[in-house]
Amino acid sequence: MQSQQGNKFTIPIGPQHPALKEPEHFEFNVDGELVTGASVRLGYVHRGIEKGTENRSFVQSMYLLERVCGICSHVHATAFCLGVERLAEIEAPPRAQAIRVLVAELERIHSHMLWLGVGAHEAGFDTLFMYSWRDRETVLNLLEDITGNRINYSTNVLGGVKCDIDREQAAAIRQGLDFLEERTTHYLDVVTSDMMFLRRTRGVGVMTYDESQRLGAVGPTARASGVARDLRVDAAYAAYDKYPVNLVTETAGDLEARFVVRIKELFESFRVIRAVLDDLPEGDLTTRMPRRVKEGDTISRVEAPRGELFYYIKSNGTDTAERVKVRTPTLPNMASVLTLAVGHQLADMPMILVGIDPCFSCNDRMVSVKGTLDSQCWTWEQLRQYGIEYYR
Amino acid sequence: MTLNLDKPWQPVLDKIKTWARINSPWAIHFNSGSCNGCDIEILATLTPRYDLERFGVKLQGSPRHADILICTGPVTRQARDRLVRIYEQMPEPKFVVAVGSCALSGGVFQGCYNVMGGIDKVLPVDAYIPGCPPRPEAIIDGLVKLLTQLQEGAAPEQNEGENTSAAAVEGAEIQLDAQANGEAK
């Protein structure tokens, strides 16, 4: 297949591919083993959730929005609840806010341990994958104990939370955290000292501070490049002002730094959960929520395990949202993958891709870049016409 | 591939085939629009606590090596063609397992403009595993039930006579074909 271009090929990967569990299509231009260009085609998991919320009441929408992403379902519901509560001018009781923080941090533990396993798997280090997923079952047990489901907990309701923490559950959480803390210390040791693993991570996919600012990276991906940005600190929501989080940053910007940042964030999560359990306010779990939400619009931002999660909610005074816009952290991070890929070996591609902790089911939102149409606001007919022409 | 030698040892050969098929089913996983919840539970079944590999089930990267297609999520319009293509690439006999509420019926995404509904709108499904997401125990139970069904010899015989070229576009047609073939036998 050698053409006049020499050893240049285009390698298509996906949408079904063994590396990731989610369908997405990548094309890598390679010269020999070196990647010279990368492009991505998103949208295989686009389900039309934002439009779906317009046909559902606020309460129903919450269950739909929880399923934007199964890994970080709680933060999606939290972002939506906080926004709608602000529109309705009510505030969840302090105990509910504290439980939201507690579940969010447990979810962060589950998400980071899951990512640690997947990252290790891409590096060919399946032992670490199996160990970290075994230990992750501990936190899933705790979540199941509190909420009744391993994944998609639906802890939140508009105006509060559903589940309480009693003394026995608190004791179980502490016990689980002690075990996880011991294991996490071991993992931190492994990812910073195992020579085989370091050959795959140290100095690979380096993103400098300037570059991460230019590409708009968010979350642990940006924090590994020294960007001190975390919504739990910068714009504390729920009860994070009461249980402050310490920022974890690294300066190297390579894959090793991303492993270290996420593992160190686990320790922060353990500490915050213990602080919540030590000082859980007494009181009600819910406050009365009106069925109709006052007219207005609001922006709600929370820190998902992968970075900043942004919700824009507009209400028209009925029990249904007029517009919900979701911006998930994988989309801004995806630009960094395509840029960093250039100049690396093809074999490093899975690692660089997994390095941002991609979540395509979050990611596949409808994005229209200004300039393709005169108006930014698409009517139903325009959208339909666009769809028909797209698939023709 | 159907090996029909019409020889006295044919029943023995069939028995060996069924034995091998039940003891080492290779699975491929395709997410056609799921929220990831089911995907990570499928992955969790392969990890030490649940360890699906003790039943011989191995998750495979390529559809051409796989016997079982594990589908999660509702079928989005973009993923539909790929799902059908992956199903076509799998060698006969093949089985489809739908995991999760969305794969069963579209679930919470019913009515969204880009969602076609459950997996059975596109492919013939052999086993349904409900739940949002189903627990790993439920996924193991579903797969073991499918394998037990194979032991009794019901499903594979029906699928073997199926015409591959017709086996794509409409799930309903395939099911009818399979039924017709079954009756012809």
Image: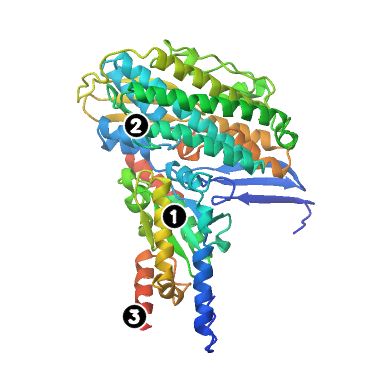
Q: Earlier in the sequence, mark 1 or mark 3?
A: 1
Residue under numbered circle 3: B183
Q: For mark 3, does the 10 Å Cα neighbourhood hold few (<14), some (14 to 19), or many (20 or more) residues? A: few
Q: Is residue B95 above or below residue A356?
A: below
Query: Could you say where residue A152 lies in the image, as x and y percent from the top left?
Result: 38, 36
What chain is tagged by disc 3? B
Farthest-out residue, top? A242
Q: CA distance from mark 3 to mark 2?
A: 49 Å
Q: Residue A250 or B21: which is nearer the viewer? A: B21
Amino acid of disc 3 = Glu
Question: Which image quadrant is residue A129 in?
Answer: top right
Amino acid of disc 2 = Thr
Tags 3 and 2 on a common chain: no
Q: Is residue A115 above or below residue B82?
A: above
User: Do the residues bearing badges 1 and 2 touch, measured as CB atoms within 8 Å?
Assistant: no
Residue under numbered circle 2: A147
Q: Is residue A65 left or right of residue A274?
A: left
Q: Residue B118 or A392: which is nearer the viewer? A: B118
